[in-house]
Image (tube, rainbow, N blue to C red):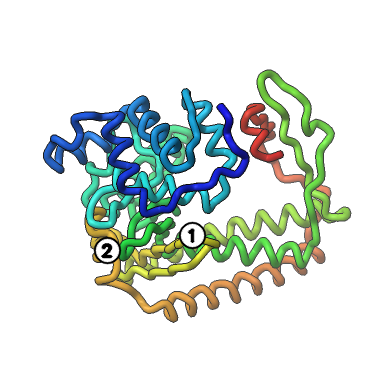
Amino acid sequence: MGIPMKPSPLHSDKSEVALRRAIIHAIPEYYAWPEAEQERYRLNASREEDFHIRQTLLKILFDINTNSEEQLDDALSEFNDEQYLLPNSTLLPFQGIGENNFFLNEYLADGVTLLKFSTLGDYARDDHRFQQQARKREDPAYEVQPYQGDLYPCWARLNIGGEFNYATLFSLAAWLHDILDETGTERIDELIPHNYVEGNNHGKQEGQGTIFDFQVNAAGKEPQLDELQHRYFEYMQMRYEHRLDQSDKESKQRVYLLPEKQGSESHTNFVFSDKSALDAVRFRHFHKDSQRITGDIAELDGLANQEQKAAVEFLDRNYYDILDNFDPSVVRLRRKSKIILADKVLDDFL
């Protein structure tokens, strides 16, 4: 196949022509159709058509020949982030919808496309219903929770002002949860320094996979670390639920836009205050609708600082309580689990 270890892309101004050639190669009649039919078809493109388009693009943009999906995936696995940027940005007009070529890079059920949902709120409600039903099936005693504008972080791609952007979409509650997770991880490691070491079974072959076994090492304070992490997990969940409820009551209808550069990549975090904000943003006009209700970043920063300060105080208070009152001989019951990674997946960790 002759795949170079570090392929050199052609200049990005070739992208539009390259995509057109790739589409014609896979779907010769595509450009004879009305725009609405093109959109419906490309969002339902078969796996084979998708492969042929990506195969042709790889040849045009990087002069790489592939004859199967496996070869194509192997070629892409050699790419760095900058090299990935060109095929991702080139493909976006084929994958996305609306004035920003918005593409939700998340799993959708078979036969379902983004055309099913007019607004981000429609998608969030559907996802909430799915998540709640899944939890109910797993635990019949689970009490289904009402929708309050919860949107788990999801990935997207879109053009903003003609520039390709990666994006992450958050509810305010989920964004703050991520902030608290990072803050807590750092503070817990300061209070109880620890790392992870290979367990006795790590690397052993089992069936078609390999056991992934790492154990925590906290210099003898493993039970105290486990207890502190457990308490903090419950604290984060409590704060998440509180923020959902508070934001739902306030109904500020704000979107906080947090643009940043990650190397050569443009990335924007979209943080939605509540369900009224999710309902106000249409996929076909994603950036324009978001700008229309943009919130003040200072307000978001103030809220994050307040939550971080309270979280550190919680951890410090509970750390000393654990040192004074926790009995490490009492082991909390938990379900045992074994992680086995398929050999191909394990390659990505090496």
| Residue 99 figure quarter | bottom left
- Residue 319, horizontal then vertical, whole percent: 74, 66
- Relative to residue 94, is residue 237 depicted above or below? below
Q: Which mark is residue 265?
A: 1
| Label 2 environment density (alpha carbons within 10 Å; few <14, some 14–19, many ≥20) | some
Please, which residue is most extreme toward the left here? Answer: 34
Q: Is residue 78 left or right of residue 198?
A: left
Q: Tell me the amino acid under the disc marked 1.
A: Glu
- Residue at the disc numbered 2: 276
Sequence-wise, which precedes: disc 2 or disc 1?
Answer: 1
Q: Is residue 341 left or right of residue 305?
A: right
| Label 1 environment density (alpha carbons within 10 Å; few <14, some 14–19, many ≥20) | some
Marks 2/1 in contact by CB < 8 Å: the verdict is: no
Q: Nearer the viewer, residue 244 or 295?
A: 295
- The residue at the point 66 percent across, 20 percent down is 208
* The C terminus sits in image quarter: top right
| Residue 294 figure quarter | bottom left
